[in-house]
Image (cartoon, rainbow, N blue to C red):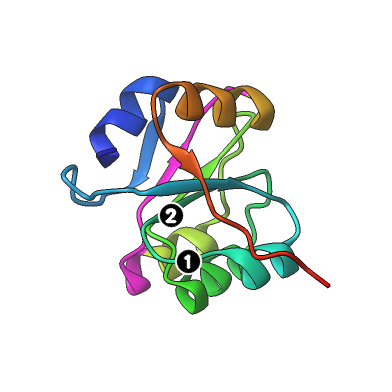
Amino acid sequence: MKLKEVKEILSAQVIVEGSEELELLSGCGADLMSDVLAFSKENTVLLTGLTNPQVIRTAEMTDLSLIIFVRGKQPPVETIELAKDRGIPLMSTDKPLYQACGLLYSAGLRAEKLAKLE
């Protein structure tokens, strides 16, 4: 799924631009960055309610391709500047996390394949 399709599906506002042709292969909804660190992979969109700079640092470490803030949340300037510096696109949607994930899943964006924890 292309970045521009995600924007349309979620009626999202662009905060930090990214290539509209960026191909996203999977999605993840999480507010615990430890979960994101444990399971995320490249070409994944992260949907979260967290807006602090740690979200950008986590995305950079796991090669996430896009961050979408849910419930209409807007990140602070520090988060926006860090995303611009790291080349990570940001969006915001008024939709809650559960609905936003469901809409993307229904449109064909699949969940990450998670390894079983022993």
Distance (Cα) linking label 1 and label 2: 6 Å
Nearer-the-camera pick, 34 or 54:
34
92 on left or right of 32: left
Quarter of the image holding residue 96?
top right
Q: Position of residue 32 (x, y in %)?
A: 75, 59
77 on left or right of 5: right
Q: Residue at x 35, y 54 (%)?
A: 89
Q: Amino acid at mark 1?
A: Lys
Nearer-the-camera pick, 98 or 111:
111
Image disc number at residue 26: none
Residue range (magenta): 84-95
Considering only vertical position in the picture, is 90 above or below 91?
A: below
Nearer-the-camera pick, 85 or 65:
65
Q: Which residue is mark 2?
A: 44
Q: Residues within 10 Å of mark 2 (few under 14, many from 20)?
A: many
Q: Which residue is mark 1?
A: 41
Q: Residues within 10 Å of mark 1 (few under 14, many from 20)?
A: many
Assign the N terminus to one quadrant of the image: top left
Q: Amino acid at mark 2?
A: Thr
Nearer-the-camera pick, 54 or 109:
109
Considering only vertical position in the picture, is 94 above or below 89?
A: above
Q: Residue at x 44, y 48 (%)?
A: 26
Quarter of the image holding residue 8?
top left
Considering only vertical position in the picture, is 88 above or below 16?
A: below
Q: Residue at x 50, y 45 (%)?
A: 27
* Residue at the outermost right position: 118
